Structures are given as structure tokens and as C-alpha cells.
Image: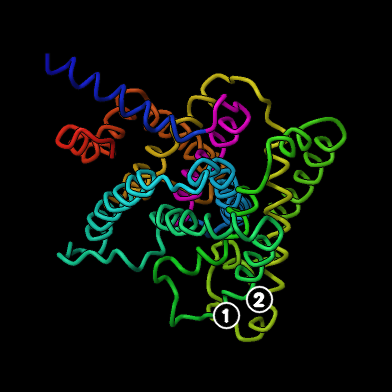
Amino acid sequence: MRTLRMGGWLRRTLFIWKGTVMAPRNYRIDNVKGVLIILVVIGHFLLPISTTRFTTNSQYLIYTFHMPCFIFISGYLAKGVYRDGRFKWGKLARLAWLYLLFELGVHVTEGLLEGQIGWRVDLFHESGAPWYLLALLLWYLFIPLCSRLGKWVSLALALAVGLAGGYAGSGLGDFLAADRVFAFAPFFFMGYFFTGRELKGLCFGGRRAAAVILGALVGAGIFLGTYDFLEPYRLAVYGAMYDRFSPELYSLCWLIRLICYGAAGALSFGLIAFLPDRRLPFLTKLGQRTLSVYVLHRLIRDLCQYFDLYRFLNVHSKAQVLLMMAGCVALSAVLAWGPVYGAFQWLSEAPFAVWEKVTGRKG
């Protein structure tokens, strides 16, 4: 009977989370998310070893667009968060709970790496992987205001904040992930105001071909040129505050970020246009289960560092690096596997299921 009750809870949990996604299901978006979450995992596993030409170029290419594109899609799927003057506070509560869990997990794994796990958990300063969940919370809160201001005013303000926010400096830094909240805000609100008709237009006929070709050319340029020519500008892809750049670049950082916006947009739209709007083996299902992969892979990466598993990898061997990337694909599949995903969703929904049971009201 306990198993049956758990199954019912799980089914209700999956229904709640699926209910936050637009219906009918857009398989192109799922496929894009599937590719992006694989790139997220590969990018994080490359971070400790991005010292050679191949690893540096690979990491820079991934970081140029994987989070901007993810954030664009998050904005596109956020249209139901605020509708008819009503805010879905349950969505924010679930994000806050997941952020807390992620922070606790990262606090433990980073403590292991540092040799001491402290009792104090700082929830207000974040520059690691949990920043994305915190940023989503803050962007969601601005949706009612942007709905009132309208599309073009909101996008102009988001762009201005994105370009000028980097000058806020280390005084603000990673407080509430402000550096990333500012830097990536244009992608979220561009996605929020992007319509289904515009998405279809991008993925049809000549526009589709142009988007794919442009994305491929930009990607090739970044992959072939980063190690030799773009190294001084690498921090731009992380959404870093401008005072972290070299002093001679400080006054031009807004322009560097603007160029990065263009490159990220070209790569993102190229990927979206390239992938089909139909179910694909493995990729579509993976794209529907990205949260468990996003949270859990980072903890596993930290544990790999803690147990010094990177010593078995020859970073100068492209074959071994490619094998590690293939392992990242396999890890993504495992973390999106039904039992793992179900357990993750159960933990994510646990307090809200208890609230519903105690009060009889949905959390």
C-alpha cells in the first residue's frame, strides 16, 4: 500500500510540474533543451581542465550560448507564470525550495573540496550553478512589471541593464547572483515576449536556413579562434562584472558584452532552427527532464574532483577528452532516467505535498 501511495504522489508531482509547461507540447523546445542540458554537463566537467587548445575552445563555444539559450527558453515557457493579473506563487515557492536544496548540496560538496564543511550556508551570494534558479526567481518577479510596460520598453530596459549592469562592480558582485541576473536578463525577457508564430517563422524556409548557416559560421569562428585570439575576453561569457577584466578593456566591456549577445543569439537561433519539431529518440525525453540533470550533475562533478578522478584523464589527449564528453552524455541519460527523475521530483515536491495533505489546499 505504501508503494501505491508513493506512486500516486509521484504521478501527482509529475502532473504539477508538467502543468507549468506550455501545452500542447512543443517537441522542438524539448529537443533544444535536451541538447543544452548535455552541453551544460560537458561544460561543467570541462571547467577544471580547460587548459589546452581543444578544451579551451570547446568550453568557450559551449559557454557562449548554452545558458543564454536555456534562459531564452525559460522565458518563452514562463508565459503562464503571470496571467490575467494573477501570479502563480506556487511556481516561485517550488523554485525557492529547489534552490535551497541545491545550495545545501553544493555547500557540502564544495566543503569537501575545501577540506571543511562549515555550518553557515550563504544563500544570498551565488556564482556557482545554483545561480540559474535564483535568477529565475528574480526574473519571474519582474514579469508583472514587464507585462505593464510592454514588449519593446521591457526589452530596451533589459538590454540597458544587461550592458550597464556590469559596471556595478565587485561591491555588488554575486549578491543575489546580480552579475548573472543583469547580464542574462535580455535573453529571459526576449524569450518571454517571443511568440509561437515567431518561433515557427524562425524554423521555416529561408529563415531557417539563414539561422542555421549563421549559427554554424559563428560557432566555427569561436571554436577555431578562442585559444589564439579571444582568450582576453573569456569572462564575458560568464556574465562577469566588468572590474574583473583587464583595466585596458574596462571602458569597452559593454561593447564586448553586446558582441557576445550577438554571438549567443546567432548560436541559439541556429540550434533552435536546426532541430525538428517531432519526437527524437532519447533527446526529447531528456529535454523534458532537465532539472534533475542540472542539479545532480554538478554535485557529481564536485565528487569527481574530491576523489581525484581527473587524474585518470590525459587532458592533452583529444580522444580521452571526447570520451569524457561521451561519458557526460551517458551521465545525463542516467540522471534523467525514470527512477532517478522520479526520486528527484518527489524530493522537490515533498513539502508541497505535505502542505496539500495538511491544509487540503494546493501549494
- In the image, 152 versus 127, the foreground residue is 152
> Which corner quadrant holds the C terminus?
top left
Quadrant of the rendered image containing residue 330: top left
Distance from disc 2 to disc 1, alpha carbons, whole Å, reads 9 Å
Q: Secondary structure at mark 1?
A: helix
Q: Secondary structure at mark 2?
A: helix
Q: Is residue 249 magenta?
A: no
Q: In this image, 323 relative to 2: left or right?
A: right
Question: Given the image, on which type of amino acid does mark 2 rest?
Answer: Cys
The x and y percentages for residue 252 are 70, 79
Question: Given the image, on which type of amino acid does mark 1 rest?
Answer: Tyr
Name the disc covering residue 167, or none.
1
Q: Earlier in the sequence, mark 2 or mark 1?
A: 1
- Provide the residue span drawn in magenta: 22-47
- In the image, 34 versus 206, the foreground residue is 206
Q: In this image, 102 relative to 129: left or right?
A: left
The x and y percentages for residue 63 are 57, 54
Pointer 2 local density, CA inside 10 Å: few below 14, some 14–19, many at least 20: many
Q: Which residue: 55% across, 65% down?
A: 239
The x and y percentages for residue 297 are 37, 43
Q: Residue furthest bottom?
A: 247
Q: Is residue 61 above or below residue 239?
A: above
Q: In this image, 76 relative to 102: left or right?
A: right
> Which corner quadrant holds the N terminus?
top left
Q: Which residue: 58% across, 58% down?
A: 146
